[in-house]
């Protein structure tokens, strides 16, 4: 007895890619077999002929329903789009799990004086998503500011609750000083979690900000000169050294420069568990695009760099030096997005959660012959492994959640705003020609998008407990 049988699709599993059938009972995959071999009573058959069957996309980096700094937008009350809208866009884009953020960023917390308890912070954030999310969700836990003592004492508790990863910044007002960082790294290493790091050299960033202002070059299109290649080089290498002393696993969010890719590759060659993420719009645009009218719409911090940096990110994802694609989802409307026009006020982020899979398929599979298994890795499996969702998520095999996407490799589509589902009035992908597009999305056995329609409910999504496997934290495994 099967609830759903997905028949005749080109199924992508870690062992093979081929014509197979996938049997589902309740929320789980129960069988994967040669076509016609899964017999018995079936409630629903989905014909996947001509489609690729892949694990549901995992978005490892999103900022949903949070306040946007007023000096970026000119308004006090702008928020990024809420979970309903972001997860609706995600579902249409073949994404079934979103990893967002939580943490105490209050002033007392930043100064290291007093922090809200981890469980209270987590509960508040879960309440924002619960009954408002079409996909499953989880949160990296941000530790901000001077993080001695109290904050460090909460790390074990957070891990026990099922927070598999922590996030720190080495720049901006929420930055963690290096000494404190070592304390956090050591504690996370001791109890088994992944460190997600936004690494920029704060001193380079502030020096370049001052310099460009003094020289009258503070226009927003020069943002890549502030958040520059040297900053990534120095910050990545410093963080990697600290992580080596502490013995912690690193996940570099938004690797943006060839220097970052090289630093990751060198650490990995020495056996250090260091992994890199690239944002899908960094695979297309360059800093030259900032100069076009409305060009800063593409901006996400740190900053989009040069053509050879873009090429290094593409190559890193092809050859394994980088592990995941992500979006840094941070959706606003065009007005607030384009309000800030200086290197200190340009608004970060964009709406990308829906376009990541089709853009990655176009760039890697269609244009560069990436094997389908590798495509599944960089859109789903690796994020699941590195961030503690595997094998519940990120793989098509018996026992795993039936998070499955049917992807049509022959569907050619020029993206336009009217095709997209974010709560926004622009897309930097408007006009981009995709080859391949998701056509059906299933979350834990329930179809949530089909025939261009949303058939899931905002009550479907659940918070997912995470725990990163020790092997991933011991040496580079993906
Ligand atoms: Zn981010």
Image: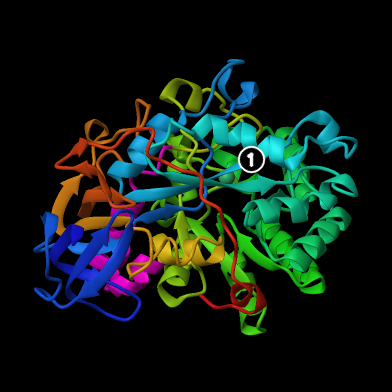
Q: Which residue is mark 1?
A: 102
Which contiguous range is marked in magenta? Answer: 351-377
Secondary structure, mark 1, is strand
In which quadrant of the rendered image does the N terminus lie?
Answer: bottom left
Coordinates of residue 15 in the picture (x, y in percent):
32, 81
Residue in the picture at 83% in, 46% down = 151
Magenta highlight on residue 374: yes
**Location of residue 476 with respect to 375 vertically, above or below:** below
Residue in the picture at 41% in, 37% down = 351
Which of 474/72 is in front? 474
**Location of residue 353 with respect to 334 vertically, above or below:** below
Coordinates of residue 447 in the picture (x, y in percent):
24, 46
Coordinates of residue 229 in the picture (x, y in percent):
63, 58
Q: Main secondary structure of the magenta part?
A: helix
Residue in the picture at 56% in, 22% down = 73
Which of 320/348 is in front? 320
């Amino acid at each position: 007895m099967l609830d759903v049988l997905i028949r005749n699709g080109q199924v992508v599993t870690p062992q093979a890619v081929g014509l197979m059938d996938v049997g589902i009972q309740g929320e789980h995959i129960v069988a994967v077999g040669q076509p016609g071999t899964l017999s018995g009573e079936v409630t629903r058959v989905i014909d996947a002929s001509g489609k690729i069957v892949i694990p549901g996309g995992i978005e490892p980096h999103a900022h949903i329903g949070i306040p946007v700094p007023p000096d970026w937008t000119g308004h006090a009350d702008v928020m990024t789009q809420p979970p309903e809208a972001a997860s609706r866009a995600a579902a249409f884009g073949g994404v079934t799990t979103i990893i967002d953020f939580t943490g105490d960023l209050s002033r007392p917390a930043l100064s290291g004086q007093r922090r809200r308890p981890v469980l209270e912070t987590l509960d508040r954030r879960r309440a924002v998503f619960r009954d408002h999310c079409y996909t499953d969700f989880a949160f990296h836990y941000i530790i901000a500011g001077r993080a001695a003592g109290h904050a460090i004492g909460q790390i074990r508790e957070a891990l026990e609750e099922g927070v598999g990863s922590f996030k720190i910044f080495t720049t901006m007002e929420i930055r963690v000083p290096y000494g404190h960082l070592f304390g956090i790294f050591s504690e996370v290493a001791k109890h088994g979690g992944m460190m997600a790091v936004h690494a920029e050299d704060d001193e380079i960033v502030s020096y370049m900000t001052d310099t460009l202002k003094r020289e009258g070059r503070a226009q927003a299109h020069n943002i890549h000169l502030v958040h520059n290649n040297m900053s990534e080089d120095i910050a990545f290498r410093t963080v990697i050294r600290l992580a080596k002393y502490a013995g912690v696993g690193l996940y570099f969010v938004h690797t943006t420069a060839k220097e970052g890719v090289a630093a990751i590759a060198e650490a990995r060659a020495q056996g250090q568990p260091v992994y890199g993420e690239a944002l899908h719009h960094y695979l297309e645009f360059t800093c030259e695009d900032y100069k076009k009218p409305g060009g800063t719409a593409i901006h996400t911090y740190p900053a989009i760099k040069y053509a050879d940096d873009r090429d290094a990110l593409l190559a890193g994802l092809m050859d394994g030096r980088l592990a995941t694609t992500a979006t840094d989802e941070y959706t606003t409307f065009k007005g607030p997005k384009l309000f800030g026009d200086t290197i200190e006020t340009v608004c970060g982020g964009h709406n990308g959660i829906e376009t990541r899979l089709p853009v990655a398929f176009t760039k890697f599979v269609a244009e560069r012959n990436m094997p389908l298994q590798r495509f599944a890795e960089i859109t789903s499996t690796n994020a699941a492994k590195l961030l503690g969702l595997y094998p519940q998520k990120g793989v098509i095999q018996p026992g795993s959640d039936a998070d499955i996407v049917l992807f049509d490799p022959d569907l050619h589509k020029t993206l336009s705003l009217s095709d997209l589902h974010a709560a926004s009035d622009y897309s930097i992908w408007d006009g981009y020609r995709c080859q391949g597009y998701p056509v059906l999305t299933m979350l834990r056995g329930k179809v949530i998008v089909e025939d261009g329609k949303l058939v899931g409910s905002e009550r479907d999504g659940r918070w997912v407990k995470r725990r990163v496997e020790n092997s991933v934290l011991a040496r580079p495994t993906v």
